[in-house]
Amino acid sequence: MKTNEKPVYGGQAVVEGVMFGGRTQTVTAIRRKDQSIEYYHLPRKQRPFLQKLKKIPFLRGIVAIIEASANGSQHLNFSTERYDLDPKDDEKLEHEPVSKLTLIFGVAVLGVLSFLFSKFIFTLIPVFLAAALKSWFPGDFSQIMLEGLFKLILLLSYIYFISLTPIIKRVFQYHGAEHKVINAYENNLELTVENVQAQSRLHYRCGSSFILFTVIVGVFIYLLVPTDPLWVRVLNRLALIPVVLGISFEVLQLTNKLREIPILKFLGYPGLWLQLITTKEPRNDQVEVAIASFHELIRLENEQQKNSENACS
């Protein structure tokens, strides 16, 4: 039985472009130095076992992260390898040479592979910082609150300072363009530059919100386990990473569903506030790239569906 529900699409910003993913395809469009748009296509591999896991609450978030890691890293690699932005396009870049390694680490704030790696760092450093102040904040509750505060400060500081670099600012503009396209699509608007630019650059389903929710959710979960001795605390934090990720994913999905209810939509506000840093207002030419990427994704998915129907007939 066919459903009339609109497909759900997501994406991420890459260097000088945007990646969008659908049910069967993922597409990246990037702007080259000659102003042409280049595409990269990567079909989604259908794995029945993973599809079953994606229907199980709390496990489906882990599966989604693994899949996003596999797909997102390839799109990110494509965009960095093809990076050839003309420095004249941005005066500040004339005085700031950008290596591909710098690009990869900078853009990684939006990538899941880097998120998984940095999750260990942002989990452990606050533990040791809080433990160093235990003589002043001795109680378990105080330690966990202090740990959460340090984690939040580290996260916000990292994102804020990389956002000051010209190249990452451009990536964050493409991130804003990605959200605007999704918002226009979900509002049933024709994807023109004018219509897309009129949309919000924030979105409840953004990965930035997910990252922030891991900090908030972690605080509540850590209240359930001991903080002493320190080595037990470290092991607990590492072992609980999958639990934190799984629950945070469910919280993200819940806030997205509740956003239509005025009295409950505020639950997603913390994530939207973080997006004020991780997204910037895009230029029209950047919006054009995002629209092109989305249109190419729709074209490929429709083409594949048509081929599948012809094969079955």
Image (cartoon, rainbow, N blue to C red):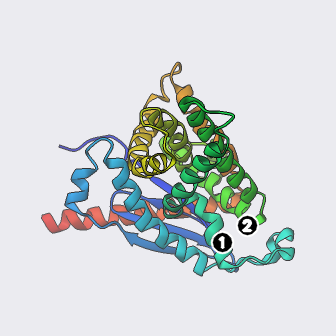
What amino acid is found at the position of numbered circle 1 in the picture?
Leu
- Calculate the distance from the C-alpha at mark 1 to the C-alpha at mark 2: 8 Å
Residue placed at 30% from the left, 67% from the top?
45
| x and y, in percent, of residue 276 in the image | 69, 44
Q: Give the mark nearer the N terminus: 1 vs 2.
A: 1
Check the image and report above or below for 74 versus 272.
below
The quadrant the N terminus occupies is top left
Q: Is residue 297 visible?
A: yes
Residue with the mark numbered 1: 103
* Residue 291 x/y as whole percent: 56, 59
Q: Which residue is mark 2?
A: 167
User: Quarter-wise, where is residue 99 in the image?
Assistant: bottom right
Q: Position of residue 236 (x, y in %)?
A: 43, 47
Q: Residue at x 42, y 36 (%)?
A: 225
Report the residue at 63% width, 43% height from top.
Answer: 130
Q: Is 175 positioned to the left or the right of 309 in the image?
A: right
| The C terminus lies in quadrant | bottom left
10 Å neighbourhood of mark 2: few (<14), some, or many (≥20)? Answer: many
> Relative to the observer, which residue lies in front, 40 or 158?
158
Q: Which element type, helix, strand or loop, lies under badge 1?
A: helix
Q: Is residue 198 something one can see in this rendering?
A: no
* Identity of the residue furthest to the top in this view: 263
Could you say which quadrant of the image residue 47 lies in?
bottom left
Residue type pointed to by label 2: Ile
Q: Residue furthest left?
A: 313
Where residue 187 appears, as percent x and y from the top left, is 51, 39
Residue 271's place in the image compared with 21, above or below, is above
The residue sitting at 57% across, 30% down in the picture is 139
CB atoms of marks 1 and 2 within 8 Å: yes
Residue 308 versus residue 98: which sits nearer the camera? 98
Looking at this view, is 75 or 123 the one in front? 123
Label 1 environment density (alpha carbons within 10 Å; few <14, some 14–19, many ≥20): many
